[in-house]
C-alpha cells in the first residue's frame, strides 16, 4: 500500500502546470518570498564577512601560539590582563553592525507587514484541521480542500489574500517559494498574501507541529492563469453532479456515517468535520496531498484510511466489497 | 548551619564498606561534592537515553518513507528527546558543575544549605523518573503507557483534554514542575554560597569567573523558572479543574501559552550555555598560560547577556502574526545579544593570543567551542532578522542552529570541563589518546549531521515530521545527517569507555596536573570531605599563581 503511495507520489502530475516539489527558499516566485530572499542575502553577506574575520582570527591564534617542541616547560608567556582600547573597539564595532542590521530588518518588516499589498483578485479563507486544509472562497461560494487554487499575478495585479484560521490546534501555512510562514491559530485570525508570478504547482507543508499526522499535512498552491482560475471557480461553485447511473451508490453513501463528516452540496450530506467532497474528483490528490486521486487510491483510502495515514481522524469504515464499490463508484462521479 | 551532623563518616580509603553502607552513604549524603557528582552522573545517564532517542529519530529519517517507528512513537521520541535534554541533562549539569566546583573555588567547606542541596538533587531525580514513568502509566489513546507527544514546547491547545487524551501530558507538566523545584533550590543555594561563604580576601572582584558566571546563571534560573512553573500549573488547572487559560474552544488564548513558555524558554537557552562559558573561562587561561583577557568585561558581558535575554522571547513567535512594531522590537533585542556574546568570543581569543597553548583534549574542546559557537551565533543573527525567520522558522535550519549552540556550544564546553576536572574528582587522568578519538569523531559526526541540516531548512523541510516524500530534495541531506548521528554515538561511546577505563587504570593525576591557578587545585585529588585543612586566604583572582610566582604575583596588578 505504501509502496503504492510512493509510486503515486512520483507520478502525480497536473497537465500543463510545472511542479515545484523542491521548495527552495532562494528561488522565490512571489513578492513576499522575493523580499525575504533579498534580506536573507544581505544577512548572509554581513554574517559571512564576520565569520571569515573572526574564524580567521581564532584559527590564526590557535596555530601561531601553540606550544612547540623546543619550548621551555617552565617559561610562562608575558601575563597580559586586558586592554581597554581593544575591548572598547570590539564592543563598538559589533554595536554598529547590529544597528545597521536592525535598521534594515525594521525596514523590511514594515515593508512586508504594513505596505498595502496589491489589490486582491481572490480572497481565500484557509482553515486548519488535524491534518488537512479547508480552503474557502467566500467570493465564489466555493469550498475545497488541500489544494489552493490562485490566479497568477504577473504584474502584481492579481494577488490572493489569505485569512488564516484553525478549528482545532495551531497549524502554519508555508509554501516556501511563495511566502514565509504564518500560523493558523484557533480563536484568532491571521492574514497573509501571495502573488505567484508563474503558473505552477507549489509544494508546501504544515510548519507547526499539530499532532500525529503533522508530517502528512501537505499543501499545494496551484497558480493558474486568471481566466483558468475563474473558470475553475465557476465550476467548483456548482452543486454536485447528480448522475442517475450511480443512484444506488449515492443511496449507499447516504445510508452510511460518511454524511456526518462530509458535505456534498446539493445532497443531504452536510457534515463539517472532513473535507468537502462536492467536486472531489477535480482534486489532484487525496489524504491531504498523500496520494494521487486515482480510483484505486480512492478505494484504498475509503476502505481503510488508517493503513495509509495512521492516526488520521477518518476511521476504517469496515465496508463489504459491494458497499465499497458502490460508495467509490458514486464518489468517482463527483467531478 | 555549620553544625550539621553527617549521618555517616566520610568513606575512608583504608576501610572496607559493605554495599548497603556505601549505598546509604550516597543516599543520605549532604556533601556538595557527592551531590554534584550525582547530578552529573544522572545527567550523563539521561544524556545516553535521550541520545539513543536521537539516533532512532535519525534512523527513521535516514530514508524517505521509512518505517523504523510508527508516527506516534516518533512524536513521543522527539518530545522526550527535547524535554530530557533541556530539563534532565542541561539543568542538572548546571547544578552538578556549580555544586562540585563553587565551594572548592571560593575556599568554602560546603554549600550554604547542604540539606536543601540534597533535597534539590532528589526532587530533580524524582521529577525525571516521574516523566519517564509515563511510558508505563501515561495511559494514552492506546490504553497502555504512552509518553508525552506534544513536543518539548507543548503548544496549546494541542495539550488540552480535547487533543491530548490520557495522562501523558500531565506527566510532562508534573515531571518538569517537580524537577524545576530542584533547579530553583539549587540556584538559591549557589547564590547564598557565593554571597556568604567566600574565603578571606576573596572579594567579588577576585572571585573566579567560573563562580561569577554560575552566580549570574543562578539568578537567571530564579527569574525565569517561576513563569514556566506557573504556566504548568495553569495547564494542569485547564486539564483538571475546568479553567480556560489556554482552552481555545472556550475562549482561551493559544498565544498566551507561547508567551509564558518562551519568556522562560529563551533565557533558558542562556541558562544552559552559561556553564560552558564558565568552563571556558577557566580552561582557556590555564592551557594558554595567561590570565583571562579583560576580566571585568567578561563578567559584565555575562550580566548583559542575562539582562538582554529577558527581552527576546517573542523571536520564537515571529510567525504568530504580531504587529510590525513588536516584530521589530524582538528582532532588535535578539540581535543585541550578539554584542556581549561577541565580546566573550573576542576575549577568549585574546586570552589565547600571545600565550603558549597546550592542546590537551580539554583545550581542543574549547577551540571547537569557539568555532562552532561562532557559527551558532551567526545563524542566530539570521534567525533574528524577522523576515528571514518567516522562512527559517520551524524548519530544519532552526534544528541545525540550536544544535550548534547546545552541542557545538554547551556539550563541547562540558566535555572540556569533564577532561579538565576529572583528575580533581577521581584522582586519575582521563586517557588523552582515547580523548583525541572522542574529540575528532564528535566534531566530524556533529558537522555531518548539523551542518547539512541547515540546507534541509533552505529546501523547505519543516521540523517534527516523521516522514517525507522522496522527491522533495531532502533525501541526500537526511542520509548524511543520519550517518553523522551514528558517528556521534560512537564518539560518546568513546567518552564513556574513557571514563570507565581511566577510573580503573588511568594515570594518577596528583593534586594539580594542569598547573592551575584556582583554589580547587590547592587541595588533594579527590578533595577530602572538608575540602581544605585550613581556610585559604587569597589576594588576587589567581591565588595559586601568586603562590607559584612569589616574585611576580597577580595582586600587584589587580
Image (cartoon, coloured by chain):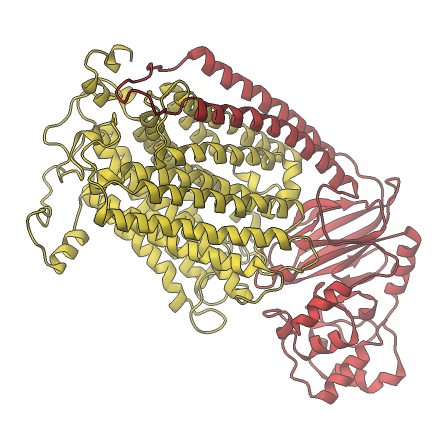
Relative to B91, is B504 on the left or the right? Answer: left
Kindly give the residue lying farthest to the front in the view shown.
Answer: A70
Q: Residue visible at 67% across and 59% down?
A: B470
The one nearer the camera, B174 or B359, is B359
Q: Residue visible at 14% across and 52% down?
A: B25
Q: Residue B176: x and y, percent?
A: 39, 52
Q: Residue A216: x and y, percent?
A: 65, 62
Residue B237 makes an appearance in the image: no
Q: Residue B413: x and y, percent?
A: 39, 37
Q: Residue B192: x and y, percent?
A: 25, 33
Q: Colour of chain A?
A: red
Write down the quadrant of residue B333 in the picture: top right
Q: Which chain is yellow?
A: B
Relative to B136, is B6 on the left or the right? Answer: left
The one nearer the camera, B136 or B169, is B136
Number of numbered discs visible in the structure rendering:
0
Q: Residue visible at 74% across and 54% down?
A: A21
Relative to B108, is A294 on the left or the right? Answer: right
The one nearer the camera, B436 or B246, is B436
Amino acid at each position: 500500500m505504501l509502496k503504492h503511495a510512493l509510486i503515486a507520489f512520483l507520478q502525480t502530475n497536473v497537465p500543463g502546470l510545472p511542479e515545484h516539489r523542491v521548495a527552495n527558499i532562494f528561488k522565490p516566485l512571489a513578492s513576499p518570498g522575493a523580499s525575504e530572499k533579498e534580506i536573507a542575502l544581505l544577512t548572509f553577506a554581513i554574517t559571512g564577512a564576520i565569520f571569515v574575520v573572526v574564524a580567521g582570527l581564532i584559527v590564526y591564534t590557535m596555530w601561531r601560539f601553540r606550544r612547540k617542541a623546543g619550548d621551555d616547560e617552565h617559561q610562562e608567556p608575558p601575563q597580559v590582563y586586558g586592554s581597554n582600547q581593544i575591548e572598547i573597539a570590539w564592543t563598538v564595532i559589533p554595536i554598529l553592525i547590529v544597528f545597521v542590521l536592525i535598521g534594515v530588518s525594521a525596514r523590511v518588516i514594515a515593508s512586508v507587514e504594513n505596505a498595502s499589498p496589491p489589490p486582491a483578485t481572490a480572497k481565500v479563507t484557509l482553515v486548519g484541521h488535524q491534518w488537512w486544509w479547508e480552503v474557502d472562497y467566500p467570493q465564489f461560494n466555493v469550498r475545497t480542500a488541500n489544494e489552493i487554487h490562485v490566479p497568477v499575478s504577473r504584474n502584481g495585479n492579481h494577488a490572493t489574500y489569505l485569512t488564516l484560521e484553525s478549528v482545532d490546534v495551531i497549524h502554519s501555512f508555508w509554501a516556501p517559494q511563495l511566502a514565509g510562514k504564518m500560523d493558523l491559530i484557533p480563536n484568532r485570525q491571521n492574514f497573509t498574501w501571495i502573488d505567484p508570478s508563474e503558473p505552477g504547482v507549489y509544494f508546501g507543508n504544515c510548519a507547526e507541529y499539530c499532532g500525529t499526522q503533522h508530517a502528512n499535512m501537505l499543501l499545494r498552491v496551484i497558480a493558474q492563469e486568471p481566466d483558468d482560475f475563474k473558470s475553475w471557480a465557476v465550476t467548483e461553485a456548482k452543486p454536485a453532479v447528480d448522475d442517475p447511473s450511480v443512484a444506488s451508490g449515492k443511496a449507499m453513501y447516504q445510508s452510511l456515517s460518511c454524511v456526518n463528516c462530509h458535505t456534498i452540496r446539493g445532497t443531504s450530506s452536510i457534515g463539517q468535520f472532513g473535507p468537502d467532497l462536492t467536486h472531489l474528483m477535480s482534486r489532484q490528490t487525496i489524504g491531504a496531498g498523500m496520494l494521487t486521486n486515482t480510483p484505486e487510491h480512492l478505494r484504498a483510502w475509503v476502505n481503510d484510511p488508517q493503513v495509509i495515514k495512521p492516526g488520521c481522524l477518518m476511521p476504517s469504515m469496515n465496508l463489504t466489497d459491494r458497499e465499497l464499490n458502490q460508495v467509490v463508484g458514486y464518489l468517482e462521479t463527483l467531478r | 548551619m555549620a553544625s550539621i551532623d553527617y549521618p555517616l563518616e566520610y568513606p575512608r580509603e583504608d576501610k572496607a564498606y559493605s554495599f548497603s553502607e556505601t549505598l546509604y552513604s550516597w543516599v543520605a549524603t549532604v556533601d556538595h561534592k557527592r551531590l554534584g557528582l550525582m547530578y552529573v552522573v544522572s545527567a550523563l545517564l539521561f544524556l545516553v537515553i535521550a541520545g539513543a532517542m536521537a539516533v532512532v529519530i535519525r534512523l527513521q529519517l535516514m530514508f524517505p518513507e521509512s518505517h523504523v517507528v510508527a508516527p506516534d512513537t516518533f512524536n513521543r521520541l522527539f518530545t522526550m528527546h527535547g524535554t530530557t535534554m533541556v530539563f534532565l541533562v542541561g539543568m542538572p549539569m548546571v547544578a552538578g558543575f556549580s555544586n562540585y566546583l563553587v565551594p572548592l573555588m571560593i575556599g568554602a567547606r560546603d554549600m550554604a544549605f547542604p540539606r536543601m542541596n540534597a533535597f534539590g538533587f532528589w526532587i530533580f531525580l524524582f521529577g525525571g523518573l516521574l516523566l519517564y514513568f509515563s511510558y508505563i502509566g501515561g495511559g494514552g489513546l492506546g490504553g497502555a503507557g504512552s509518553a508525552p507527544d506534544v513536543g518539548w514546547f507543548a503548544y496549546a491547545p494541542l495539550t488540552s483534554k480535547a487533543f491530548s487524551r490520557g495522562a501523558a501530558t500531565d506527566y510532562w507538566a508534573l515531571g518538569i514542575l517537580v524537577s524545576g523545584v530542584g533547579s530553583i533550590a539549587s540556584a538559591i543555594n549557589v547564590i547564598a554560597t557565593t554571597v556568604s561563604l567566600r574565603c578571606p580576601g576573596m572579594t567579588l572582584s577576585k572571585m573566579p569567573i567560573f563562580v561569577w558566571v554560575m552566580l549570574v546563571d543562578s539568578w537567571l534560573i530564579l527569574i525565569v523558572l517561576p513563569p514556566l512553573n506557573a504556566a504548568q500549573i495553569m495547564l494542569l488547572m485547564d486539564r483538571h479543574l475546568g479553567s480556560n487559560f489556554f482552552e481555545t474552544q472556550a475562549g482561551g488564548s493559544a498565544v498566551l501559552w507561547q508567551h509564558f513558555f518562551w519568556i522562560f524558554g529563551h533565557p533558558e537557552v542562556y541558562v544552559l550555555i552559561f556553564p560552558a562559558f564558565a568552563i571556558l573561562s577557566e580552561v582557556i587561561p590555564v592551557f594558554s598560560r595567561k590570565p583571562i583577557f579583560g576580566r571585568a568585561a567578561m563578567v559584565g558581558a555575562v550580566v548583559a547577556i542575562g539582562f538582554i535575554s529577558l527581552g527576546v522571547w517573542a523571536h520564537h513567535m515571529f510567525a504568530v502574526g504580531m504587529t510590525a512594531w513588536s516584530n521589530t522590537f524582538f528582532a532588535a533585542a535578539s540581535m543585541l545579544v550578539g554584542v556581549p556574546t561577541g565580546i566573550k568570543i573576542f576575549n577568549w581569543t585574546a586570552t589565547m593570543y600571545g600565550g603558549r597553548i597546550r592542546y590537551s583534549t580539554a583545550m581542543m574542546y574549547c577551540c571547537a567551542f569557539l568555532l562552532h559557537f561562532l557559527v551558532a551565533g551567526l545563524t542566530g543573527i539570521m534567525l533574528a532578522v524577522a523576515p528571514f525567520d518567516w522562512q527559517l522558522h520551524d524548519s530544519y535550519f532552526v534544528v541545525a542552529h540550536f544544535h550548534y549552540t547546545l552541542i557545538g556550544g554547551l556539550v563541547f564546553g562540558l566535555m572540556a570541563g569533564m577532561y579538565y576536572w576529572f583528575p580533581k574528582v577521581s584522582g586519575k587522568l582521563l586517557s588523552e589518546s582515547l580523548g583525541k578519538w572522542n574529540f575528532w569523531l564528535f566534531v566530524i559526526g556533529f558537522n555531518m549531521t548539523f551542518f547539512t541540516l541547515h540546507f534541509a531548512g533552505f529546501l523547505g523541510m519543516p521540523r517534527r515530521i516523521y516522514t517525507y516524500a522522496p522527491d522533495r530534495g531532502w533525501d541526500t541531506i537526511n542520509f548524511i545527517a543520519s550517518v553523522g548521528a551514528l558517528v556521534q554515538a560512537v564518539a560518546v561511546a568513546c567518552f564513556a569507555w574513557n571514563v570507565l577505563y581511566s577510573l580503573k587504570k588511568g594515570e594518577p593525576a596528583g593534586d594539580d596536573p594542569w598547573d592551575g591557578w584556582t583554589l580547587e587545585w590547592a587541595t588533594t585529588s579527590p578533595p577530602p570531605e572538608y575540602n581544605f585543612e585550613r581556610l585559604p586566604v587569597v589576594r588576587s583572582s589567581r591565588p595559586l599563581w601568586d603562590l607559584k610566582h612569589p616574585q611576580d604575583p597577580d595582586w600587584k596588578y589587580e
